[in-house]
Image (cartoon, grey):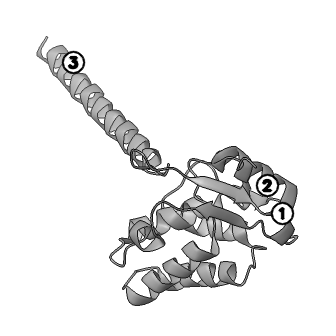
Amino acid sequence: MKKLILKNKIASIIVATLLVISLGGGVWIYTSYAQEAPTLEPGQELTVEVDEASSTDEHVEVEEERTQSVEQEFPMDMGEGEIRTALHLMSHQKVKAKKKWGALPLTEERVNRLITVVQSGDYNNGNQYLDILNAWKNKDFSEADKHHNTIWRLKDGTVGKATGVLNKEQEIAFVEEKFGKKEE
């Protein structure tokens, strides 16, 4: 009888432990992905225009009407996780993946600001960030999928691995879907 009670207690402890781990994992996954989506302050608007005339075969220029300066968006004291999130969200404009959570327009202004922030900070993966940002600054998006996956791995990604680079038409469609098309 005592053995049966002891086995039931052990089984109960194991079940309770697994439940706590599952709940904790679920909360961690939810909060990890909830941070992906950019948020706008109340009354703040984001208007984006795809300028097809200035778009090259490899890059779609996104013109924004900003309500917040890039210095406010990316302060000099950004944490490593914030740098990764910004790079990850911007890379979504360029890559094919089954799942993409969140997006941030990949603009020259953002790229230049992030270069300044990373160069002035002390980041564990600063050289990787600069390699990616400098390629983007030079409008080289041929390895955007590799760039995405580098950041994705640093963020311990499990879903949404990039499988290729979008062509111009796919990128325009993504930009218009995620950021809207400016009314003329």
Separation of residues labelled 1 and 3 (CA atoms): 68 Å
Front residue of 133/49: it is 49
- The residue under the point 48% across, 67% down is 84
Amino acid type assigned to the residue bearing label 2 in the image: Ile
Q: Give the residue pinned by disc 2.
A: 172
Amino acid type assigned to the residue bearing label 3 in the image: Asn
Q: Give the residue pinned by disc 1.
A: 52
Against 79, residue 156 (above or below) is above
Residue 140 percent coordinates (x, y): 75, 79
For residue 129, side relative to residue 32 (left or right): right
Tags 1 and 2 touching, CB below 8 Å: yes
Q: How many neighbours does mark 2 have within 10 angstroms: few (below 14), some (14-19), or many (20 or more)?
A: many
Against 121, residue 43 (above or below) is above
Q: Which label's residue is closer to the chain start, 1 or 2?
A: 1
Q: Which label's residue is closer to the chain start, 2 or 3?
A: 3
Residue 11 percent coordinates (x, y): 26, 24
Against 2, residue 90 (above or below) is below
For residue 83, side relative to residue 162 (left or right): left
Amino acid type assigned to the residue bearing label 1 in the image: Glu
Residue 8's disc number = 3
In which quadrant is the N terminus drawn?
top left
Residue 177 percent coordinates (x, y): 71, 44
Which is more foreground, mark 1 or mark 2? 1
Farthest residue toward the front? 184
For residue 140, side relative to residue 78 (left or right): right
Residue 125 percent coordinates (x, y): 46, 79
Residue 76 image-quadrant placement: bottom left
Front residue of 107/135: it is 107
